[in-house]
Amino acid sequence: MTDRQTQKLPYSVSIYEPHDAAEALVFKFVPNGLQHARGPGGEPGPVPQYIALVRHQGDEVTIDWSGTPNAPGPAQGELEQEARKRLRARMEWIARVSDLVAQVDAWGKELGWSTRRIEKKLEDSGIGTHKVPALLLQEATVRALLEPVSRRAPGSGGVVDLYLLPAYDDIASLYFREGAWYLHYLFPGAKATTARDAEALPLSKNNVAAVLEEMKKHGG
């Protein structure tokens, strides 16, 4: 689902995790530009809200409308399709980042770095607030953080930064394009002026090792 497709939907959509339901998300749809119905005395009434509880276990998705204040009526099919699209995008992004962190974690250990996974909360209007893993790496006194930034960027299906702690003064950026992660870093002698404009290197153990070695020089 692209941002352009999302914008065409004639509803404002908010997504959040309920406190009392595991493996579930609440989707609230509010019609855009709908005139308030006039009640007794000409007072405007509330705009309809269509609220669905979406549960997922593996590939199985169930959508429960029993708690909605207003019945979605003929729009139900369209709203359910939209909920499934956004749920799928959410799951794909979390899995993408989780796989990346697991891979860099394994490479880091093989390269002699201590590693620890932590959680990062991200705000995202398209798929709702969610948590993804991040990764702390340390060798001697040098510490670095692999931190997810956003699932959306121009020409990219995700951005993750790798940088020195605590100063944030040496940064590599990872961009997901064409089904793979690419690493951007300003190696000595690079013609670019920012990590984003640096040469795109395929994500590999050797390329990660090269970036970490340069960071060690700066952080040592």
Image (cartoon, rainbow, N blue to C red):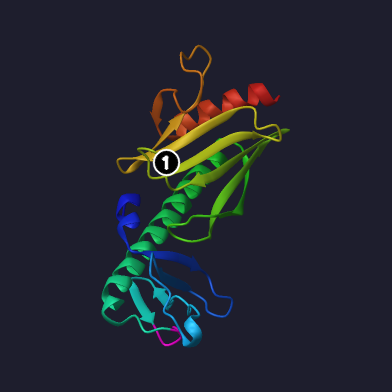
Residue drawn 42% across the image and 60% down it: 90
Magenta region's main secondary structure? loop
Q: Element at badge 1?
A: loop
Image quadrant where residue 121 sits: bottom right
Q: Which residue is mark 1?
A: 153
Image quadrant where residue 8 sits: bottom left
Q: How many marks?
A: 1
Residue drawn 35% across the image and 51% down it: 3
Where are the magenta residues, as a range? 65-69
Q: Is residue 116 left or right of residue 36?
A: right
Q: Name the quadrant of the C terminus.
A: top right
Residue drawn 32% across the image and 72% down it: 79
* 10 Å crowding of disc 1: few (<14), some (14-19), many (20+): few
Task: Tell me if residue 39 comes above or below residue 119 in the rendering.
Answer: below
Q: Nearer the viewer, residue 58 or 51?
A: 51
| Residue type at tag 1 | Ala
- Residue 35 placed where, x, y %? 39, 71
Q: Is residue 56 left or right of residue 146?
A: left
Task: Tell me if residue 73 comes above or below residue 164 in the rendering.
Answer: below
Q: Name the quadrant of the N terminus.
A: bottom left
Q: Nearer the viewer, residue 129 or 163?
A: 129
Residue drawn 44% across the image and 24% down it: 197
- Residue 96 placed where, x, y %? 41, 51
Q: Is residue 68 left or right of residue 134?
A: left
- Residue 2 placed where, x, y %? 32, 51
Task: Tell me if residue 163 comes above or below residue 189 in the rendering.
Answer: below
Task: Tell me if residue 76 comes above or below residue 111 in the rendering.
Answer: below
Q: Is residue 44 magenta?
A: no
- Residue 217 placed where, x, y %? 64, 21
